[in-house]
Amino acid sequence: MNSITERRVIHQLKIDPKISAPKIAASTSNTLGRSVSAKTVRRVLRKAGYNGRVARKKPLI
């Protein structure tokens, strides 16, 4: 994956922060014409300083 593709992946995350790595991988694969795995997308995002977190569920009071 080259630097242009990495920037594209980061840009997709900035547009929709709740998008999953497999969805980013699928859309990147469609535009590139090559297969990109979700693990590669996660590696690129972690290298850029992003990591996956899930919001804590709060009880309804």
Image (cartoon, rainbow, N blue to C red):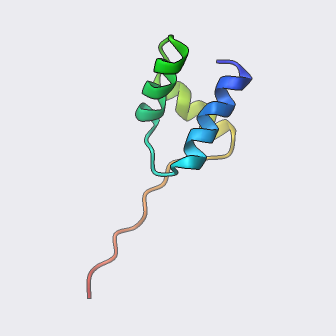
61 left or right of 38 in image: left
Name the residue at 50% across, 11% down: 33
54 on left or right of 3: left
Q: Is residue 38 above or below residue 33?
A: below
**Residue found farthest to the top:** 34
9 up-or-down from 59: above or below? above
Quadrant location, the C terminus: bottom left
Residue extending farthest to the bottom is 61
Res. 5 visible in picture: yes
Is 23 or 41 nearer to us in this picture?
Answer: 23
Give the answer, above or below, for where 10 lies relative to 37.
below
Question: Which residue is found at the position 47% from the left and 14% from the top?
Answer: 35
Tally of numbered discs = 0
Q: Is residue 39 above or below residue 17?
A: above
Taking the image as shown, residue 20 lies to the left or right of residue 32, namely left
* Residue 40 pos. (x, y %): 54, 25
- Quadrant in the picture for the N terminus: top right
Answer left or right for 11 relative to 19.
right
Residue 51 makes an appearance in the image? no
At 66% across and 29% down in the image, what residue appears? 6
Residue 47 pos. (x, y %): 68, 37
Give the farthest residue toward the right.
3
In the displayed image of the protein, which residue is found farthest to the front?
Answer: 31
Task: Locate residue 21, reporting x and y percent.
Answer: 46, 36
| Occupied quadrant, residue 57 | bottom left
